[in-house]
Image (cartoon, helix red, strand yellow):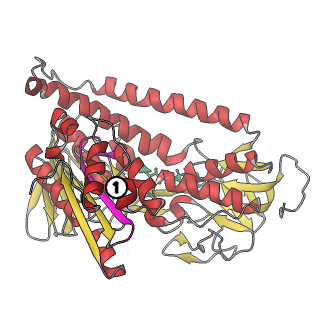
Amino acid sequence: MPVEECEVTDTSADLVILGGGSGGYACAFRAAELGLSVVLIEKDKLGGTCLHRGCIPTKALLHSAEVADAARDGEQVGVKASLEGIDIDGVNSYKDNIVKRLHKGLQGLVKAHQVTYVEGAGTLVDSRTVEVDGTRYTGSKVVLATGSYSKTLPGLELGGRIIASEEALNLDFVPDKVVVLGGGVIGVEFASVWRSFGAEVHVVEALPHLVPNEDEYLSKQLERAFRKRGIKFSTGVKFTGAEQNDSGVTVSLENGEQLDADLLLVAVGRGANTAALGYEEAGLTMERGFVRTDERLRTNLDGVYAVGDIVPGLQLAHRGFQQGIFIAEDIAGLNPPVIDEAGIPRVTYSQPEVASVGLTESAAREQYDQVETFTYDLAGNGKSQILKTAGAVKVVRATDGPVLGMHLIGERVGELIGEGQLIYNWEALPEDVAPLIHAHPTQTEALGEAHLALAGKPLHVHG
Ligand SMILES: Cc1cc2nc3c(=O)[nH]c(=O)nc-3n(C[C@H](O)[C@H](O)[C@H](O)COP(=O)(O)OP(=O)(O)OC[C@H]3O[C@@H](n4cnc5c(N)ncnc54)[C@H](O)[C@@H]3O)c2cc1C
C-alpha cells in the first residue's frame, strides 16, 4: 500500500477529510473499507447539502406534489377524488422525517466504518494538516469536500421575500404567486412543486430555453408540458431588478416586463464553498472559486485531493459519491479508471421528469463525423399511456458505432436512466441492446424500442 504507515490517534490518520457531504462521506467509507484510518470533519450535519437541503427534501416535496396531482386528476382514470388542499405542516413533517431517518442511518455507518468523526469548522493549514478549534489533524493525504452554496446575482440581495432553495424547502405556507429566477434543475423542480400545490408560477431564464444544459429537444418538450400545466416562463430574457415590501415583490425584466409575486426564488446556480478556508493561503490553485484538479482529482498540492461540488463540473450527489470512492481507491493504490463526466446520469425530477446521459445531439455532431438519432414517442408505450404521460426517448448513436447519448422526458423517466447509463458507459451498440428483453408493459420498453429502431428492426413504430 503506498500510504505511509502512520500511528492512528484521534488527530492523525491516513486520510483527513474536510466536509461530510456526499463526496466527503463516500470517500471516508470506501477508504475505511480499504483499511485506511480516516478523520472526517463536519461543521454542520453529516450528509451535507444533498441529505439536508438538496436531493432528499426536494424529492419528498415533489412526491407530495405528485400525490396532489393524482388527487386532482383522479377523474381522468375514473377515480372520484378531489384535492381539498395542501397541509404544509404535514408535507414538512413527512419530508423532515425522511431526512431524519436517513441522517440516523448515515451516523450509524460512520460508527460501523470506525471513522473518527470530528464536529467543527476546519481550515486547511498545509498539505497535511486541517485545524479545527485549535486542534490540528494530520493526514498522509487530505481530501477537500466543502461543497457549495446558493449563489445570487450582483445587486440582488437574499432576504425577506427573496429566497434561495434553503428557505424554499422550509416554507410554512404555500405561496399564491411565485417568480423563479433560473430555469435550471433547481428552479424547474420548485416551479413544478409549487404549481402542483396550486400556486401561479413564472420562471425567468436568461438563456434561450428551460433546462438549457439538456438536449434542445428535451427543453422544448418540457416547455410544452409546462405550458399545458399553466406554468409561465420567460426565456432569453435577463432579470434587471427586484423590489420588495410588506405585501409582495416586483421583479423587473430587461424587456420591460414586471412580475408581481409573493416570493422570488433565486435559483441561478451554486458557487463553491471555498472562501476563508485556508485554501489559497496553503497554495491551492483555484478557478473562479472552484478547486482546480486533474482528472484523478489531485490538486496542485501534493497529497491533497478535492471532491464534489467544489470541483468544476456537474454538481450532483452521485458524482460526489463516485469521486469519493475514486479518491479512496486511488490513495489505496487500486488505480481506478478515470470517471467519464459525460457518463454521469442527470435527472430533473419535475413533472414531467427529464433525464439524460452522454452527449446531446449537438455535442455528438461536433465530436463525430456521422451521427444518427431516433426518437421514440411515449404515445406508443403502453405503460406511459396507462400513466397518461406524454414524452419521448431520444437516442443518439455514432453511425455504425456505440450509443453516444440518451435523452428522456415523461413521468417517471428518471428511473429509466439507470439502464441508459449502463448502455452508455458500457459503450453498447444499439445492435447489442436490441436482443435484450424489456418487461411488458413497462416504460423501459420505450428504451428497447428506440434501440430496436436504431438497429434497423423497429417494432411498434409507425411509418
Ligand atoms: C435544492 C437542491 C436539490 C438538489 N437535488 C439533487 C438531486 O436530486 N440529485 C443530485 O444528484 N444532486 C442534487 N443536488 C446537488 C447535491 O446536493 C450536491 O451535488 C451534493 O450535495 C454535493 O456534495 P458535496 O459533498 O460536494 O458537498 P455538500 O453536500 O455541500 O457537503 C459539504 C459539507 O462540507 C461541510 N463544510 C463546509 N465547510 C466546512 C468546514 N470549514 N469545516 C467542516 N465542514 C465544512 C458542509 O457543512 C457540508 O456538510 C441538489 C442541490 C440542491 C441545492
Residue 369 in magenta stretch? no
Residue sitting nearer the eye, 381 or 254: 381
> Residue 15: x percent and y percent?
76, 56
> Residue 248: x percent and y percent?
17, 47
Please name the residue shown 28% across and 44% down the image.
445
> Residue 19: x percent and y percent?
62, 52
Please name the residue shown 16% across and 70% down the image.
236
Instruction: Please state which amino acid type lies under the numbered disc 1.
Output: Leu
* Left or right of residue 244: residue 302: right
- Reply above or below: 259 against 155: above
The part of the chain drawn in magenta is: 401-414
The quarter holding residue 371 reads bottom left
Quarter of the image where the N terminus is located: bottom right
Is residue 266 shown to the viewer in this render? Answer: no
Is residue 286 shown to the viewer in this render? Answer: yes
- Reply above or below: 117 against 12: above
Residue sitting nearer the eye, 47 or 352: 352
Rate crowding at label 1 as few (under 14), some (14 to 19) or many (20 or more) other CA atoms within 10 Å: some
Q: Which residue is mark 1?
A: 158
- Reply above or below: 367 against 27: below
Please name the residue shown 74% across and 43% down the image.
115
